[in-house]
Image: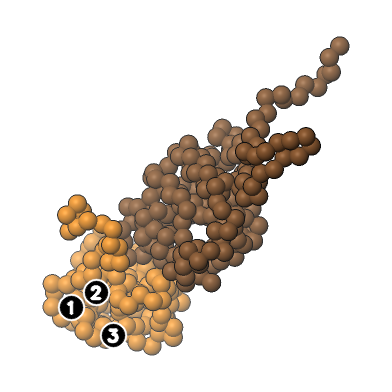
Chain colours: A orange, B brown
Amino acid sequence: MTNDFIIEKLKAEFGEEVYNFVELYDILTFNADKELNLKILTFLKETPDLSFTFLNDLTAIHYPDSVGKELCVTYLLQNLQTRKRVRLKVYTEIKEPDVYTASALFSTANWLEREAYDFFGVNFVGHENLIRIMNVDEMDYFPLRKEFPLEDQTRIDKDDEMFGR
Amino acid sequence: MGRPVTHNTKIKMVEAPPGVTGEGFFTTKLSEVVGLARSNSMWPLPFATSCCGIEFMATMAAHYDLARFGSERLGFSPRQCDLLMVMGTISKKMAPILKQVYLQMAEPRWVLAVGACASSGGIFDTYSVLQGIDQVIPVDVYVPGCPPRPEAILDGVMRIQDLVKNESIRRRTGDQYQELLDSYGIQ
């Protein structure tokens, strides 16, 4: 299976709805609108010639400067027969970070989406149990969003001048 | 002909506390005797989460040998132990568990924070890590180092022993101690 074959298949099915095909770190990467994510994932999983049946990873990225596309959700899929990988990226604005859940399609996505919610606040619509998975339940913000400082803000014994803040 | 078995005659005994000796009796303070007994038979509970725990294993092993201080018996149930040794990074999610372990220990109990992470959060000045275990439980002795060498851990244990030896038997029922526990929300 070559990248060109995958692109051809995707274009035949979705036309101009899939775009920005590039090869990043030997993995074919492309973008789509967030409303289409489930359709594309289902197509990649269930088309016999493609059969990307394994979800390697699902995570989010925060780009604070790209207005209207602040949060990116990436899906890394793998075909277990040919070991080919493909990466799908969808973008959403941070004010309304709703993305359809892939947990019905891939069971792995259940915990991965909880993690993306925990750290970035992506709201996976339709997820059956979207609660924090890694951080303490009392946490009231999404720590990996760029507007929050990495350091623990409850600490009072550090002298700002000595630590360059 | 000497006996085939030779006994170790170089045993070091702890000195008796100051007191009055007479014919067939010896008087001293009860707190001194209790402190002497407690300090030389500490049962540590290791709460090891990372590299400081490895140093602790070296401390327990033959070369450094914590047994020389009467602490060779590690208890792995908090109900049996007097000394909680916290070694390693404690994340905020671990904090309630650490507090529960502390609550399960019976009085009198002491806490030794080993290493930079347990004492202050160390290099992990980040949203997920507790910035020192003294935010959730009272700590008696802090051992610096990242990780501390076994000698430093031994020094920390010896300082705990000093505290135990000199502690008044009324301390744990006093108002000051109760205030300390109240400040941590411990009954």
Q: Which of B52 and B68 is in front in this view?
A: B68
B137 or B95, nearer to the observer: B137
Dividing the image into 4 quarters, which one contains the N terminus of chain A? Answer: bottom left
| Type of amino acid at the residue the image marks with label 1 | Lys
Judge from the rendering whether residue B49 lies leftward or rightward of residue B173; answer left or right. Answer: left
Q: Which of marks 2 and 3 is nearer the N terminus?
A: 2
The residue that disc 3 covers is A98
Q: How crowded is mark 1: few (under 14 residues within 10 Å), some or many (20 or more)?
A: some
Whether pointer 1 and pointer 2 mark residues with C-beta atoms closer than 8 Å, the reply is yes
| Residue ID for mark 2 | A72
Front residue of A61 and B71: B71
Q: Earlier in the sequence, mark 3 or mark 1?
A: 1
The Cα atoms of the two marked residues, 2 and 3, are separated by 11 Å
Measuring from the top left, give residue B159's x and y in whole percent: 49, 44
Chain holding disc 1: A
Residue depicted at 65% across the width and 37% down the height: B16
Locate residue A97 relative to residue B113 in the image: left or right.
left
Residue B39 to residue A83: above or below = above
Question: As shown in the figure, which amino acid type bears the numbered disc 3?
Answer: Asp
Indicate the chain on which mark 3 is placed.
A
Dot 2: what SS? strand
Quarter of the image with the C terminus of chain A in it: bottom left
